[in-house]
Image (spheres, rainbow, N blue to C red):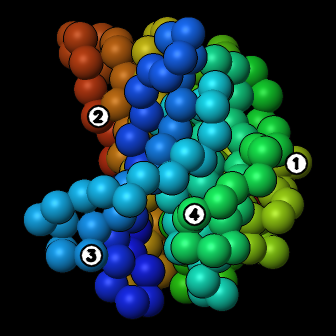
Amino acid sequence: MVSLPDGTMLMNIYGWSEGREYSSYLFRSRDNGVSWGDPSLIAKGYNETALLTLPDGRILALLRDGLGTYRSVSEDGGYTWPKPDEILGRGFHPADAILLKSGAILMTTGHRLEPFGVFAMLSHDGGNSWDVENGLLLDWGSENTDCGYPSSAQLDDGTIVTIYYGVRHRDFPDLERYAICLRYVETIF
């Protein structure tokens, strides 16, 4: 969920539409989450969408299809969305994004290719382009593709914290399922 400068809360949901194809939607609340409505279609064929309100008021959506991660940016409060562009191909999903104190956007995704874990990279231009080449595999201990769903926050001291889940970590063989909290700083990129 994200909020607009006027206090409107935005929440994405996904579900099946015609032909059992996933679609990603945005719903609005103007009463602090008591009621939700005024839906907008973000994109058909996508799900598990992360939203980020950018400093200029645009809304960045990071969407998952069956393979990778895509982006779309709304310039009208989430009412209309251009066709999503691919950012990362097969095995990188689902995504999360936060705006760092430096102004860069941090995207984290599940890394569902061997080695399995969580991947991170930055955008320095409001999500228009992503520094994939300098992206980092933050953790690679999961034993299979059932991992990811990262969520990140930046602390007051600049430290970034990312938590994600997985199944059977190489360093913790007795745990069937786990959540790992990673701490790092932006300068590692």
Query: What is the secondary structure assignment of the residue under circle 3?
Result: loop
Badge 2: few (under 14), some or many (20 or more) residues near its Cα, within 10 Å?
some
Q: CA distance from mark 4 to mark 2?
A: 35 Å
Q: Which residue is mark 1?
A: 133
Residue 79 bears which disc, if any? 4
Q: Which mark's residue is nearer the viewer, 4 or 2?
A: 4
Badge 4: few (under 14), some or many (20 or more) residues near its Cα, within 10 Å?
some
Residue at screen point 34% across, 13% down: 168
Asked whether disc 1 touches disc 4, contact meaning CB atoms under 8 Å apart, the reply is no
**Which of the two discs, 3 and 2, labels the residue nearer the N terminus?**
3
Query: In this rendering, does residue 86 appear at all?
Result: yes
Q: Which residue is mark 2?
A: 179
Q: Is residue 155 left or right of residue 63?
A: left
Q: CA distance from mark 3 to mark 4?
A: 15 Å
Residue at screen point 35% across, 31% down: 165
Q: Amino acid at mark 2?
A: Ala
Residue at screen point 26% across, 26% down: 178
Query: What is the secondary structure assignment of the residue under circle 4?
Result: loop
Q: Which mark's residue is nearer the viewer, 3 or 1?
A: 3
Residue at screen point 60% across, 54% down: 61
Q: Is residue 56 above or below residue 49?
A: below
Residue 30 bears which disc, if any? 3
How far across and down, in percent of the image, does residue 6 sit? Answer: 39, 89
